[in-house]
Image (tube, helix red, strand yellow):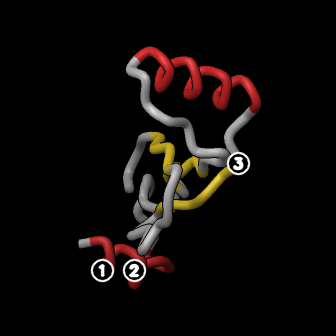
Amino acid sequence: MYEGVIYVGGNIAELGNDAVIEKPAKGEMTTLKKLLGTYRLPCPTTFRKVVSGRKLWNFDRKELEIWKAAL
């Protein structure tokens, strides 16, 4: 994952390259509940926020193996 934010209400089988899990802020949870409510969708009790770990933003020869795995 190079950049972005993904909210997951279920299981995560695999994160992939350079993705990390963060806890959503309270305001983000409120926004998600309102958005899902607009479409009358059930809201999971917990969400996980998947974001970029930002390791792949700048190439460094010391991290060559990380880059090989990403490509």
- Image coordinates for residue 66, horizontal then vertical, percent: 42, 77
Q: Which of marks 3 and 1 is nearer the N terminus?
A: 3
The amino acid sitting under disc 2 is: Leu
Seen in the picture, residue 54 relative to 44 is either above or below; the reply is below
Q: Is mark 3 on a helix, strand or loop?
A: loop
Q: What element carries label 1?
A: helix
Q: Give the label on residue 64, or none.
A: 2
Question: CB atoms at circles 1 and 2 under 8 Å apart?
Answer: yes
Q: Name the residue under label 1.
A: 68
Q: Name the residue under label 3.
A: 23
The answer to which of 71 and 13 lies nearer the viewer is 13
Q: Is mark 2 on a helix, strand or loop?
A: helix
Front disc: 3 or 1: 3
Alpha-carbon distance for marks 2 and 3? Answer: 29 Å
Determine crowd level at label 1: few under 14, some 14-19, many 20+ residues with C-alpha closer than 10 A. Answer: few
Question: CB atoms at circles 2 and 3 under 8 Å apart?
Answer: no
**Residue shown at 56% from the left, 18% from the top:** 34
